Image (cartoon, rainbow, N blue to C red):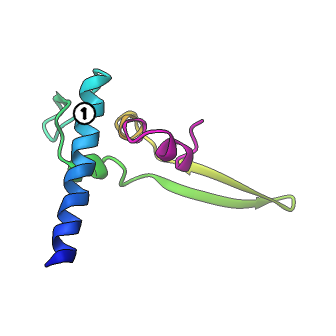
Amino acid sequence: MVVMALILFIHNLGEYVLRKNLKQNKRSIPNQLGKNTNNPSLRWAFEQLRDVRVVTLKFKNDWVREIKGITKAAKTVIEMFGSDAMRIYGYS
């Protein structure tokens, strides 16, 4: 029971942070109907990241890492989770 409660707490905290940051920055992402919303579920926000891929290639003895498939909505979601998320996805 404790583990389930902790998981629900983390989920709700993530959703709260996402919604708060969207509203503070006056940003939105499209919902399932294509209309902009600043009140998405966390599941829907993560759905925007489903096509993001990390591609790592070896080129002339150097490893090159690129992030592919980031849409406008995915970029907005990443930005709303702050500098750590932006660093992970290759934004400075």
Q: Residue at x 24, y 26 (%)?
A: 23
Nearer to us in this view, 33 or 83: 83
Give the residue furthest to the bottom. 1
| Secondary element at tag 1 | helix
Q: Residue at x 37, y 50 (%)?
A: 49
Kindly indicate the quadrant of the structure image that contains residue 62. Answer: bottom right
In the image: residue 59, left or right of residue 70: right
Q: Considering the image in quadrants, where does the C terminus appear?
A: top right
Q: How many marks?
A: 1
In the image: residue 24, left or right of residue 31: right
Q: Which residues are magenta?
A: 78-92
Question: Circle 1 is placed at which residue position?
Answer: 20
Q: Is residue 52 above or below residue 39?
A: below
Give the x, y percent position of residue 33. 13, 36
Kindly indicate the quadrant of the structure image that contains residue 18. Answer: top left
Give the x, y percent position of residue 72. 39, 33
Q: Is residue 3 above or below residue 27?
A: below
Chief SS of the magenta region: helix
